[in-house]
Image (tube, helix red, strand yellow):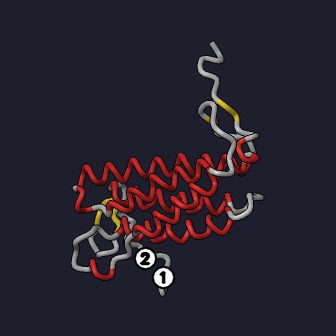
């Protein structure tokens, strides 16, 4: 159980923050950007949960919110340090759960005939925004791999983000009446 005694510490007032292992880094470091983005995505999913959602999506989104706290903790603790045995890591079971939900939802959708424009219903539009946010965080995570090395990022965290963006896409389509309210791209339609 996490216990927060103080919210304000003053430790970040000069542009530095602490990772979970105590290492001080710049607040604009890629690792901090990655877990900050995860927090942003979690907040966005909180907004999505205020919407009327198709059956089964709300409880799954709540599980994703919990996973996103795990993911933020994963990014906040670089692998291989002295606290590795205590580190919280995204695991294969969490990825497999997303994959199973993608399969379930895909079976409920109308076939795609073009790329989908973000929008449709309000819930669908918000889920598209969550999808794009997950993709941005995934790009940051891959930049973290490039800057710090593959051994400094949990590979399952990268896979999780990739699957989560796919899941947000199919959830957006499901929220758009199973794809019937999707807005489709018309290539060159405004020429």
The residue closer to the viewer here, 11 or 116, is 116
Q: Residue at x 28, y 67 (%)?
A: 78
**Classed neighbour count for the residue bearing mark 2: other residues with Cα under 10 Å, few (<14), some (14–19), many (≥20):** few
Name the mark on residue 152. none
In the image, 60: left or right of 164?
right
Pinpoint residue 160: horizontal percent, then vertical percent: 44, 59
Residue carrying label 1: 6
Badge 1 vs badge 2, beta-carbon distance below 8 Å: yes
Pinpoint residue 18: horizontal percent, then vertical percent: 33, 70
Q: Secondary structure at mark 2?
A: loop
Whether 33 is drawn above or below 187: the answer is below
Q: Is residue 15 visible?
A: no
Asked where in the image residue 114 lies, by quadrant, the reply is: top right
Pinpoint residue 126: horizontal percent, then vertical percent: 66, 50
Q: Secondary structure at mark 1?
A: loop
Name the image quarter holding the C terminus: top right
The residue closer to the viewer here, 124 or 12, is 124
How far is mark 1 from mark 2, CA to CA? 7 Å
Residue furthest to the top in view is 191
The residue closer to the viewer here, 130 or 19, is 130
Name the mark on residue 9. 2
Whether 22 is drawn above or below 134: the answer is below
Whether 144 is drawn above or below 82: the answer is above
Q: How many marks?
A: 2
Q: Residue at x 70, y 34 (%)?
A: 183
Pinpoint residue 55: horizontal percent, then vertical percent: 74, 62
Q: Residue at x 62, y 69 (%)?
A: 62
Q: Is residue 23 visible?
A: yes
Q: Residue at x 39, y 61 (%)?
A: 157
């Amino acid at each position: 159980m996490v216990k927060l005694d103080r919210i304000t510490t003053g430790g970040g007032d000069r542009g530095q923050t602490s990772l979970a292992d105590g290492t001080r880094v710049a607040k604009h470091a890629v690792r901090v950007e990655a877990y900050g983005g995860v927090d942003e995505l979690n907040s966005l999913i909180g907004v999505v949960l205020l919407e009327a959602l198709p059956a089964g999506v709300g409880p799954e989104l709540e599980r994703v919110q919990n996973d996103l706290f795990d993911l933020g903790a994963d990014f906040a603790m670089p692998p291989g340090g002295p606290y590795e045995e205590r580190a919280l890591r995204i695991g294969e079971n969490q990825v497999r759960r997303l994959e199973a939900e993608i399969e379930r939802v895909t079976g409920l959708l109308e076939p795609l005939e073009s790329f989908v424009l973000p929008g449709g219903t309000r819930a669908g539009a918000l889920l598209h925004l969550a999808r794009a946010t997950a993709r941005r965080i995934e790009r940051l995570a891959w930049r973290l791999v490039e800057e710090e090395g593959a051994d400094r990022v949990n590979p399952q965290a990268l896979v999780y983000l990739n699957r989560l963006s796919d899941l947000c896409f199919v959830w957006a389509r499901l929220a758009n009446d199973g794809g019937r309210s999707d807005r489709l791209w018309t290539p060159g339609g405004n020429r």
